[in-house]
Amino acid sequence: MGREAAGPDPGCLPTTTSSAIAGGALTLDMRKRNRKPSRRGGDRGLGEEMTGDVIRLQSRHAVVDLSDGQRIRCTLRKTLFRDLGQFTKPVAVGDRVTVTVFGPRDAVVESVMPRHGWLARRQAETGLEQIIVANVDQVLITVALEEPAFRPRIIDRILVASERGGFGAVIAFTKTDLVQDRGFYEDYATLYRELGYPTLFISAVSGEGIDELGEVLRGKTTVLTGQSGVGKSSILNVLQPGLELRAQTVSPKWGKGKHTTSSTSFIPLEIGGYVADTPGVRSWGIAGLEPSDVAIFFKDLSPFVDDCKYNECTHDHEPECAVKDAVAEGHIDPRRYESYLRIIFGMEDEEDATS
């Protein structure tokens, strides 16, 4: 709601002596009267401080669900951008924030409350940490069996990010209707289940696994992520008819999907809970970790890390490495170990994860 600027009442203008005018001097009281209103108050008034959750970001604005049930578009306070540290932006979808509300369409995000975890990847251009979403309960990693081609190594990269963020993870194998023989994919599903990650086989065409997916999502806040074109939007449309999210077929030329979700946003579920729908990814760089720390976030490697001879062991070439011994003895799956090596020797990107 727009406001008209209130002009000064001529009858209330301060009087000045001719000598003051000639000397170009104004009293302190006159300076205060002539000063422009502060953006922090002024004709806005003091505003009302409230808390809320960021459900969507738009450049330097955030859409916030306030604690009283209102939804409002807020400007981000400029001071939030002064010290970003290792992050690309000061505010992420899912953040709990304090907001000063001046009116129905006039509010400012003042600060971000401490996060209890976040899912992030490395921004290729800057090397900084790009937070995808904060303060969720779990990550649903979607990977297609076909169209686009199955890429198990991106699963491992997102699992590292979810372990570091403190979230549980569920792996959904999508587009099952395109594959007759699932033996190869079932083998991978067994591998992840034995590590403690629940797995689902889902088809938006046949409806397979949709009920099971609903039970996984019910009552929780879940971030949905994966490659472009794996069918995230199609799955949500089947799970909750009426969403009408735009789905995109995979490019026959490149074998990759196109982005249909342009920014992360929260979708309320009729069964209870929320899904943070994220743009599809073609790469996932590891953020915020040194190569020697990555193994800690591999569930199958971490039990052996402390038994290595060297504290900074990379588990590649060092002698007396307990992780390498565990691989040789069959305690660690060679596919996971190879995935780990690809991560530490190519942490800046994920384009090698094509097999």
Image (spheres, helix red, strand yellow):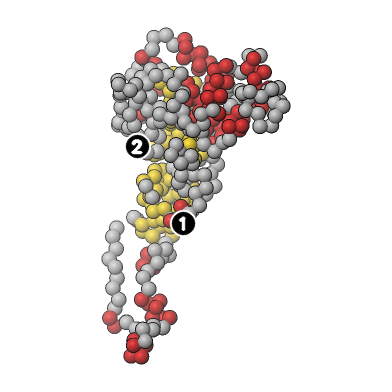
Q: Position of residue 343 (x, y in %)?
A: 53, 27
Mark 1 — residue? 79
Kind of residue indicated by mark 2: Ser
In the visual, does 254 lie left or right of 305?
left
Disc ID at residue 262: 2
Is disc 1 surrounded by few (<14), some (14 to 19) or many (20+) residues within 10 Å?
Answer: few
Evaluate whether residue 273 shows in this view.
no
Q: Position of residue 171 (x, y in %)?
A: 48, 24
Q: Residue at position x 61%, y 33% from top?
A: 293
Separation of marks 2 and 1 at Cα, in angstroms: 27 Å
Does 95 appear above or below 225?
Answer: below
Residue toward you, 82 or 195: 82
User: Of marks 2 and 1, which one's residue comes earlier in the chain?
Assistant: 1
Residue toward you, 355 or 218: 355
The total of numbered circles placed on residues is 2
Is disc 2 surrounded by few (<14), some (14 to 19) or many (20+) residues within 10 Å?
Answer: few
Query: Are dots 2 and 1 in contact, CB under 8 Å?
Result: no
Kind of residue indicated by mark 1: Thr
Residue toward you, 143 or 83: 83
Q: Residue at position x 47%, y 12% from top?
A: 184
Q: Position of residue 12 (x, y in %)?
A: 32, 82
Q: For mark 1, give the secondary structure.
A: helix
